[in-house]
Image (tube, grey):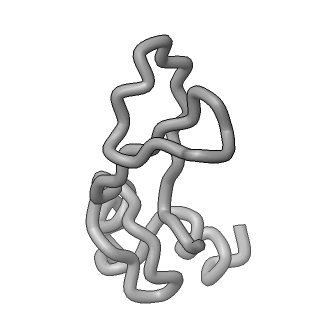
Amino acid sequence: FIVSKVNLFKNEEGNGEFKSGEVDGLSINVGQAPGKKCERCWIYDPTVGDNGKHITICQRCVEVIEGT
């Protein structure tokens, strides 16, 4: 199970799209992560395009490439 982002919320109503039959009160909603897809690591990240020198990759990848 590979994801770009996970948010955990305490929801008393448990009104997610998927309800677990094994874990009481667990419900899951699935949606697209915000941002664009990084061409280097393939995660969706809001920082893709923020760096004018590397407009197709996320800030984490910029730091790796530039060694910062």
Observer-nearest of 62 and 21: 21
Q: Position of residue 10 (x, y in %)?
A: 55, 18
Left/right placement of residue 39 relative to residue 3 reads left
Q: Is residue 15 above or below residue 60?
A: above
Q: Name the residue rendered at 34%, 56% in the picture.
A: 33
Hey, which residue is sitting farthest front in the picture? Answer: 21
Q: Name the residue rendered at 57%, 35% in the picture.
A: 26
Observer-nearest of 9 and 58: 9
Q: Position of residue 29 (x, y in %)?
A: 37, 45
Left/right placement of residue 1 relative to residue 11 reads right
Count of numbered labels shown in the rendering? 0
Q: Name the residue rendered at 39%, 77% in the picture.
A: 38
Q: Position of residue 53 (x, y in %)?
A: 36, 76
Q: Is residue 41 above or below residue 36?
A: below
Observer-nearest of 62 and 53: 62
Hey, which residue is sitting farthest right in the picture? Answer: 67
Q: Is residue 8 above or below residue 58?
A: above
Quadrant for residue 61, please give it. Answer: bottom right
Observer-nearest of 65 and 7: 7
Quarter of the picture containing the C terminus is bottom right
Quadrant for residue 37, please give it. Answer: bottom left
Q: Position of residue 18 (x, y in %)?
A: 40, 48
